[in-house]
Image: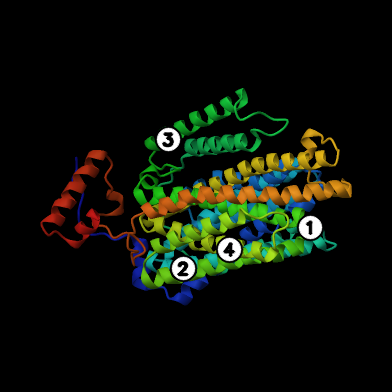
């Protein structure tokens, strides 16, 4: 076998950024269009939150339909995020971002014209595909032009944009629903914003694309999308009236099919040269624990925000605009947590303490929210949501940062996409499962309430969200059931987030590097190809470090 050279050959991307030294102003200019696109995507997902009760009312949807309007978008987001991440390692990132915006516009227009729940779900899938691109590409581009040590500050900016989009969405959506425009414009309003971000991207984002051999793992992509879709469909409908039980032939077939598909995915990913899920990255300590924590955070982020708006509108009788205002404490906590932790990470170069603190706050806030009912003082509810919003802000971007700090620039898209993928899968599964739990709990509470006034409920209609067609005594019972049922959602989320706390406690804090790329003593194309070569080079590096070898050798051992 031909011996590879050990002379230093820094990565071109690292040289360009470290030698030219992009200033803070230049970085902000480069990120303007990207953050605008990210803001549009976040706004599109939150603007519909306070419109959903009205949409379900007018399109005659159920609690299951309510959950699936959210889940359909998250499912498509989850299934495509790793694919977009891998594509960003192979193709021009700027072009891919613009393509995802165009797809997003198409999905938004479709959703605005929806007249049935199935058509609306289809449109949400299209939006989710675009969201997967924007989520993965935004993280990948930031990781390409900013070193991990400085990235905390800009991740804080992204967290701030996320918080503003999350706060502005419900407010704007509530205002639109209450105005003569109607709920359809909650989708249409995102179209001009997307066009503006498309133009800004063209003008402000200038990143060099270094061509690489293009090998897309289509088999892995298909297996990934199929396996994730099947398991999420199963958890969404299992135990629901009119579908199938958790223990049934249908459940056995779907779970078995998922196991087969994901097993085949793992097999394929170990064989292909450019896997869609980089096992060699996600199975190392820091990324693996960050992924576990991300799944838990995804459940808390998507499930709590989804059902919080429902709680305010259905249970407390708030208008969409009022519901948007009532969610501001959670958003304020998210904004403060993201910006503060980002600035502190950049200043001190330490990230683990903020992850631990965020996880603790998340558990406390969700646990307190698990005590609410349809009569709880709204100031108390706001205080509880502020606490878990603060925890979310401290965790989301810093989990991605911890993973990006361990990988080379050439793999940053795949690594960022993997974290976002598992977070979104957690969120999608959380919304689906907790939606099923919510539906069962609400149906039970409604049935009990109706029995007390001598009314015999009709099975499936017991959890209806079409409140306008109900007589006033029944409407009061339904509102109380949704309010009391929401507490169970938050309490389950708090328990799940204990897993996130354990994961971040087990993470080893690796100092944030000040270079864009990992400093290597080999050319990038000279990576070892076999396990024997990897083991041999590790032993060699260890020996050099022990006997006083070079600093690069010691870095390899560490």
Q: Nearer the viewer, residue 15 or 422?
A: 422
**Residues under numbered marks 1 and 2 in contact, where contact means CB atoms less than 8 Å apart:** no
**Residues under numbered marks 1 and 3 in contact, where contact means CB atoms less than 8 Å apart:** no
Looking at the image, residue 464 sits to the left or right of residue 22; the answer is right
Say whether disc 1 or disc 3 marks the residue closer to the N-terminus: 3
Alpha carbons under labels 1 and 3: distance apart: 48 Å
Position of residue 180 measured from the top left corner of the image (x, y, whole percent): 85, 62
Q: Nearer the viewer, residue 33 or 54?
A: 54
Quarter of the rendering occupied by the N terminus: top left
Position of residue 304 measured from the top left corner of the image (x, y, whole percent): 61, 53
The numbered dot on residue 266 is 3
Say whether disc 4 or disc 2 marks the residue closer to the N-terminus: 4
Helix, strand or loop under label 4: helix
Marks 1, 2: nearer the viewer: 1
Residue picked out by circle 2:
342
The numbered dot on residue 74 is none
The numbered dot on residue 162 is 4
Marks 1, 4: nearer the viewer: 1
Residue picked out by circle 1:
317
């Amino acid at each position: 076998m031909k011996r590879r050279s050990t002379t230093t050959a820094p990565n071109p991307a690292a040289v360009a950024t470290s030698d030219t030294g992009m200033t803070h102003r230049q970085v902000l200019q480069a990120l303007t269009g990207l953050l605008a696109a990210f803001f549009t995507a976040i706004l599109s997902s939150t603007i519909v939150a306070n419109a959903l009760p009205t949409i379900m009312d007018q399109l005659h949807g159920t609690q299951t339909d309510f959950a699936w309007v959210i889940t359909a978008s998250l499912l498509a987001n989850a299934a495509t995020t790793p694919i977009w991440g891998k594509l960003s390692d192979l193709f021009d990132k700027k072009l891919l971002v613009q393509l995802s915006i165009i797809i997003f516009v198409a999905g938004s227009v479709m959703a605005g014209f929806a007249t049935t729940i199935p058509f609306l779900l289809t449109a949400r899938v299209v939006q989710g595909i675009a969201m997967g691109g924007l989520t993965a590409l935004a993280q990948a581009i930031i990781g390409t032009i900013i070193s991990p040590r400085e990235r905390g500050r800009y991740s804080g900016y992204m967290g701030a944009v996320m918080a503003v989009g999350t706060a502005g969405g419900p407010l704007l959506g509530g205002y639109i629903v209450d105005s003569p425009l109607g709920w359809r414009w909650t989708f249409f309003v995102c179209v001009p914003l997307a066009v503006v971000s498309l133009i800004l991207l063209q003008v402000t984002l200038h990143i060099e694309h270094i061509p690489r051999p293009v090998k897309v793992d289509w088999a892995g992509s298909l297996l990934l999308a199929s396996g994730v879709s099947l398991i999420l469909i199963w958890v969404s409908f299992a135990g629901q009236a009119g579908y199938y039980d958790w223990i049934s032939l249908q459940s056995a077939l779907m779970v078995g099919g998922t196991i087969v598909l994901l097993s085949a995915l793992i097999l394929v990913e170990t064989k292909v040269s450019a896997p869609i899920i980089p096992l060699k990255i996600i199975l190392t300590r820091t990324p693996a624990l960050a992924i576990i924590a991300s799944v838990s955070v995804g459940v808390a982020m998507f499930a709590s925000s989804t059902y919080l708006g429902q709680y305010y509108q259905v249970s407390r009788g708030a208008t969409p605009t009022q519901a948007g205002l009532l969610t501001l404490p959670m958003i304020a906590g998210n904004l403060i947590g993201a910006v503060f932790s980002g600035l502190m990470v950049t200043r001190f170069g330490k990230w683990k303490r903020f992850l631990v603190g965020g996880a603790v706050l998340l558990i406390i806030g969700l646990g307190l929210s698990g005590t609410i009912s349809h009569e709880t003082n709204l100031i108390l509810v706001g205080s509880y949501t502020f606490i878990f919003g603060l925890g979310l802000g401290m965790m989301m971007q810093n989990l991605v940062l911890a993973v990006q700090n361990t990988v080379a620039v050439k793999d940053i898209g795949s690594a960022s996409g993997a974290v976002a993928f598992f977070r979104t899968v957690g969120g999608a599964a959380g919304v689906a499962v907790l939606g099923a739990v919510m539906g069962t709990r609400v149906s039970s509470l409604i049935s009990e309430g109706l029995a007390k006034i001598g009314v015999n409920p009709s099975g499936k209609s017991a959890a209806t969200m079409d409140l306008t067609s109900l007589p006033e005594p029944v409407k009061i019972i339904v509102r109380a059931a949704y309010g009391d049922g929401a507490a169970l959602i938050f309490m389950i989320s708090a328990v799940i987030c204990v897993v996130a706390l354990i994961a971040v406690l087990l993470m080893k804090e690796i100092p944030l590097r000040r270079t864009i790329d990992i400093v290597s003593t080999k050319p990038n194309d000279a990576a070892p190809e076999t396990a024997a070569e990897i083991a041999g080079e590790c032993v060699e590096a260890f020996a050099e470090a022990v006997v006083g070898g070079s600093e690069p050798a010691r870095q390899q051992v560490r």
